[in-house]
Amino acid sequence: MSVVVVGGGLGLLGAVRQTVETLTVANIATADVAGSANLVTELRPFAVVVSEDIYDFDSAEFDALARDVRTTLIVVRTGGISEVALKSALLPRITEAFSVYHR
């Protein structure tokens, strides 16, 4: 079971890691935009977390990837947001993705 984080830097990665740890034991993998499709296809994570600026780069492709591998795509704003605010934004969305994965 895994979550893939695409872009967003260390703040987003830290917030995702802390959020996921409250729910379950899951691997967290990171990918750059170029390698994200291969990694997501290989891992088939329950969630893919993408920073808003990366998502805006090619939103249609990220939407198609999430649909193809049947994962939840979580797009978050990272600019000017504290790690605490990121965790607050991520918790309900990752919780929902995790529960959908187990249905």
Image (cartoon, grey):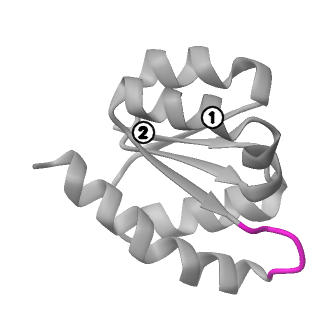
Q: Earlier in the sequence, mark 2 or mark 1?
A: 2
Q: Main secondary structure of the magenta part?
A: loop
Which numbered marker is on residue 86?
none
Does 86 sit left or right of 58 as displayed?
Answer: left
Can residue 4 be seen in the rendering of this structure?
yes
> On the picture, is 100 further left or further right than 16?
left
Side of 48 relative to 33 (left or right): left
Q: Is residue 40 above or below residue 42?
A: below
- The residue shown at (47%, 18%) is 41
Work out which quarter of the rendered image holds the N terminus and state it. top left
Judge left or right: residue 98 versus residue 9: left
> How many tags in the picture?
2
For the residue pair 52 and 42, the one nearer the viewer reads as 52
Could you say which quadrant of the image residue 79 lies in?
bottom right
Q: Residue 44 at what x, y percent from top left?
A: 39, 27
Find out whether residue 80 is within the magenta segment: yes
Label drawn at residue 60: 1
Q: Using the rendered image of the protein, determine whether residue 21 is visible from the camera's viewpoint.
A: no
Residue plotted at (21% across, 59% down): 99
Say what amino acid the circle numbered 2 marks: Ser
The x and y percentages for residue 47 are 44, 46
Quarter occupied by residue 80: bottom right
Mark 2: secondary structure: strand
Label 2 – label 1 distance at C-alpha: 23 Å
Q: Judging from the image, what secondary structure is the residue with disc 1 in?
A: helix
Residue 72 is situated, as x and y percent measured from the top left of the image, at 40, 47
Nearer the observer: mark 2 or 1; the answer is: 1
Disc 2 target residue: 2
Residue lying at the far right of the rendered structure: 80
Asked if residue 53 is among those painted magenta in the image, a careful observer would answer no
Magenta-tinted stretch? 77-81
Between 27 and 92, the one nearer to me in the picture: 92
